Amino acid sequence: MAVGAPVVAEVAAAAPRPARVEAERRRIDLGSLPLNVALVLLTAVWIVPTLALLVSSFRPRFLINTTGWWQALVPPFQFTLNNYREVLDTYSIGTAFVNSLTIAIPATVIPITIAAFAAYAFSWMRFPFRNSLFLLLVGLLAVPLQVTLIPVLQIFTRTGLTGTFLAVWLAHTGYGLPFAIYLLRNFIGALPSDLFESAEIDGAGPVTAFFRLVLPLSVPALASLAIFQFLWTWNDLLVALVYLGGSPDVAPLTVNVSNLVSSLGQGYELLTAAAFVSMALPLIVFLALQRYFVRGITAGAVKG
Amino acid sequence: MAGVVFEHVYKRYSGNVTAIADMNVEIKDKEFMVLVGPSGCGKSTALRMVAGLEEISDGMVKIGERVVNDVAPKDRDIAMVFQSYALYPHMTVYDNLSFGLKLRKTPKAEIDKRVREAARILGLENYLSRKPKALSGGQRQRVALGRAIVRKPQAFLMDEPLSNLDAKLRVQTRVEILKLHKSLQTTFIYVTHDQVEAMTMGDRIVVMKDGLVQQVDTPQTLYHKPVNVFVAGFIGSPAMNFLSARVTGDGRASLKGDGFEIPMEERVLSGAGARRDQDVIVGLRPEDLKDARFPGREGMPRVPAKVEVVESMGSEIFAYITVGGKTLTSRMDPRSEDLQPGQPVQLAVDTDHLHLFDPKTERALVLQGEPARV
């Protein structure tokens, strides 16, 4: 008995433990229930219109005009590819898609490249007026894009750039740089100074340090910035419309789709197809780079 | 391989802040020199000036025969180990070790040979393809050392390389660094705030405070013959006890303070230039305050005291005792285990090891019972 007693005591002590753990887990589950419900609702609010657009884009015109999109989800399934065929053939959505890419890719690459160099210089190189220049740059974040439209357009017209892709690239670069430099400087500036000193002793000059240290270490920030900038230039209507005009051989998807809205009127089955074409790429980009997107936003906030 | 020399070196920052003033230190070839001092004393700044990471405001720093004031860090032929290790997080251990050599356009085969050699010395052979984040703290520290080794520099600079390790690993790595120093036969300059590290590692030690070099000497000399109150209090653990006293006595001289009187030889006091009625600071190492009950202490002056706390370390006992209004530390042998808090005790003072300092200048007057030659 003397030997058994402690064992019994131990069992007795151990017995309530699983029950408590169980209760604990249930409490956590209950606690996160509202959060989960909210998440599901929020996701639904976002997904339903997208789904409606996707479904509608595959439905023939008479069905779109007579029934709701959700009725397409029950048999008999009546889907068609005609809408896509028509917008691609007749309304030069294909060209517009290529134009959008032609605008968005350089308009993403150019500012981010410049911003990376600038951010490195602002964080780690010593030069006169460094802080004042940076403050000026941050100040530019507050300037609304619209106030620049007329003066910039005048410059472009005078230099014969209006209506060319170069004009939009330059414009997007200008509009994107302040934020890009600001974000990258925060990230690059937070890299430990020891790394750069160590590299300096190892024999790395500023250029080597930039390409061998700063760039590889800034991939998360660069990627999330690239996503931001790409989505912004891809979805941009205003800048393209002002500096490119409506000419179909240079017009991006946004300009083209907005033209469709006014010209098609009734035929909105074509509009759904065109809209979905314009949405497809951002969706793919986002889904593919989602990892970087999240990491980039939290970068710097949490020390890893 | 080369020595490093500081000649009248100053470091001033804008706004008239002087970080280092008139530093004159000669570090010999193959020497293990430790720079030690409390934070903000300028020890890291001094090291960074050797590395070329800080500009030298005035004076000269020489590596070997070459004045390096205006030489870029990469051309100084030194290697530095940082407190944070500063490993390149996106590179494997192999790439971390080879980065410096690659930038110097060392032939591939040579790089490979040196990297594998360093990895062998440091026991990193199995980790060469790992990235730093997949290594433990001790392994990262070894990679940082390896990065310095592969370069075969003229001097190794180390800025608190052990302070991010836990206590046990720190002691191990301390020994490893010493072995490394022995096998590499290169000048090491080592910065630390930890006087135990300094005492155990340095061939010689530079003690610094407020940008001024206090004393440069071997650990033993610093311990036994500190030139001023700061060095005396900084070197040694537990720290030296300090008591205010006055030189008194008609005929026989003695040091009289709050709750004690210690007779002194006239010869020593006059040799140190101490006059009657002069105030002094008495410095006593914990081991020079002994329990008077045991034999061999009969001739030593007695000081009545009261035990406050007793810490038993096994092989020795630290007793915290009050004399007058002051708490002193005494290092006693295990025979004094029976001491109880609150108990009165007679202390025997070993005057052969007593130090005296001038309270105004804080400079040493008497060291180890003999007039200080300053």
Image (spheres, coloured by chain):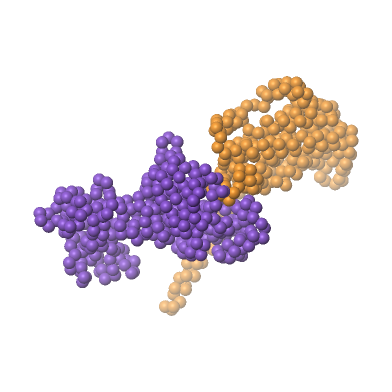
Chain colours: A orange, B purple
Residue at x 17%, y 52% (from the top left corner) = B247
Q: Is residue A302 visible?
A: no
Return the residue nearer the eye: B289 or B265: B265
Residue A207 location (% of width, % of height): 63, 43
Q: Is residue A11 left or right of residue A91?
A: left
Residue located 57% across and 53% down the image: B87
B328 or A70, nearer to the observer: B328
Residue B210 position by quadrant: top left
Percent coordinates x, y for residue A220 in the rendering: 64, 46
Image quarter of residue A164: top right
Position in image of residue B23 (x %, y %): 40, 46
Examine the rendered structure and indicate whether residue B121 appears above or below residue A86: below
**Could you say which is closer to the camera, residue B40 or residue A284?**
B40
Q: Residue at x 55, y 64 (%)?
A: B122
Extreme residue in the front direction: B65
**Residue B31 can be seen, yes or no:** yes
In the image, B260: left or right of A275? left
Measuring from the top left, give residue A267's x and y in whole percent: 85, 31
Left or right of A92 in this view: A42:
left
